[in-house]
Image (cartoon, rainbow, N blue to C red):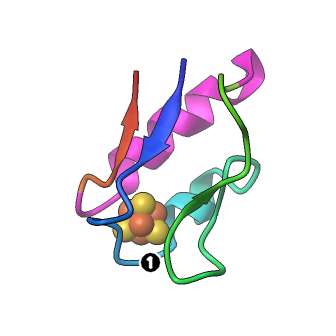
Amino acid sequence: MKLTVDRGRCEGHGLCEGVAPELLSADEGYAALLVDGDVPTELQSAAKTAVRVCPIAALRVT
Ligand code: SF4
């Protein structure tokens, strides 16, 4: 599973960081990925939750 951020859509609300702090940081005004490449198995549930809570659908899992 890969997690991607559409920085053109992200508005820096930080909700994703709140539910998946191991994967995302909103410190720079937009969500930045903290993992490079595949999401580790133990964090895949958190990645899906982050996608669900983003109010503007800026996150995707593939
Ligand atoms: S919840 Fe969505 S809009 Fe907010 S920081 Fe995360 S990706 Fe960006």
Q: Residue at x 35, y 77 (%)?
A: 11
Asked if residue 52 is positioned above or below residue 55 in the image, the reply reads above
Location of residue 22 in the rendering, given as x and y in whole percent from the top left corner:
76, 49
User: Start and end of the magenta stretch?
Assistant: 40-56
Give yes or no for residue 45 being in the magenta stretch.
Answer: yes
The mark total stands at 1
Q: Which residue is drawn at 44% across and 77% down?
A: 12
Amino acid type assigned to the residue bearing label 1 in the image: Gly
Q: In which quarter of the image is the N terminus?
A: top right
Give yes or no for residue 51 being in the magenta stretch.
Answer: yes
Using the rendered view, name the quadrant where residue 8 is placed: bottom left
Location of residue 3 in the rendering, given as x and y in whole percent from the top left corner:
51, 35
Please rate how many residues cluster around mark 1, counting C-alpha atoms within 10 Å: few if below 14, some from 14 to 19, many from 20: some
Location of residue 20 in the rendering, given as x and y in whole percent from the top left corner:
64, 50
Residue denoted by label 1:
12
Helix, strand, or loop for circle 1?
Answer: loop
Q: Does the residue labelled 1 lie within 8 Å of ligand 1?
A: yes
Location of residue 30 in the rendering, given as x and y in whole percent from the top left corner:
49, 73
Q: Which residue is drawn at 61% across and 64% down?
A: 18
Using the rendered view, name the quadrant where residue 62 is placed: top left
Ligand 1 sits in which quadrant? bottom left
Residue in front for this viewpoint, 62 or 42: 62
